[in-house]
Image (cartoon, rainbow, N blue to C red):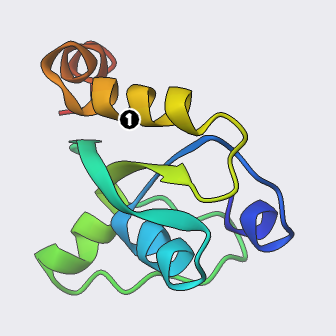
């Protein structure tokens, strides 16, 4: 996703780990605020040949196992995107993530 956003692709909503959201926000690609949508209770997977992430502390691991939903600054459906992010952060959205195995 990072490559696509860097290449100029736009989406209405992005759900990504906090580290990626911070990077997108610093580049002005996403809105400043988002909602926590969940975390997975598993470790970090690294593709063959990809750089190994820094996961020395529990805070480091949270950057790879927690997810935040934000609206993209250049998204075409800003009102719908904001409504979706609000839904995902609310009780009904949380139930959907829990049903999918995401706390």
- Farthest front residue in view: 79
Answer with the quarter of the image where residue 60 lies: bottom left
Q: Is residue 42 visible?
A: no
| In the image: residue 97, left or right of residue 76 | left
* Secondary element at tag 1: helix
Q: Is residue 78 visible?
A: yes
| In the image: residue 33, left or right of residue 13 | left
Q: Quadrant of the C terminus?
A: top left
Q: Dot 1 corresponds to which residue?
A: 85
Of 87 and 102, nearer the camera is 87
Of 80 and 6, nearer the camera is 80
Q: Position of residue 101 (x, y in %)?
A: 27, 24
Answer with the quarter of the image where residue 84 lies: top left
Q: Quadrant of the N terminus?
A: bottom right
Of 8 and 52, nearer the camera is 8
Q: Position of residue 7 (x, y in %)?
A: 86, 70
Q: Does residue 46 sit above or below 60 in this rendering?
A: above
């Amino acid at each position: 996703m990072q490559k696509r956003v860097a290449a100029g692709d736009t989406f209405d909503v992005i759900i990504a780990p906090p580290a990626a959201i911070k990077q997108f926000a610093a580049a002005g690609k996403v809105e400043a605020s988002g909602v926590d949508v969940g975390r997975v209770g598993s470790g970090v997977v690294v593709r063959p040949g990809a750089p190994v992430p820094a996961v020395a502390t529990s805070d480091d691991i949270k950057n790879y196992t927690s997810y935040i939903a934000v609206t993209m600054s250049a998204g075409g459906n800003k009102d719908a995107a904001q409504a979706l992010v609000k839904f995902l952060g609310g009780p009904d959205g949380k139930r959907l993530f829990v049903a999918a195995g995401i706390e």
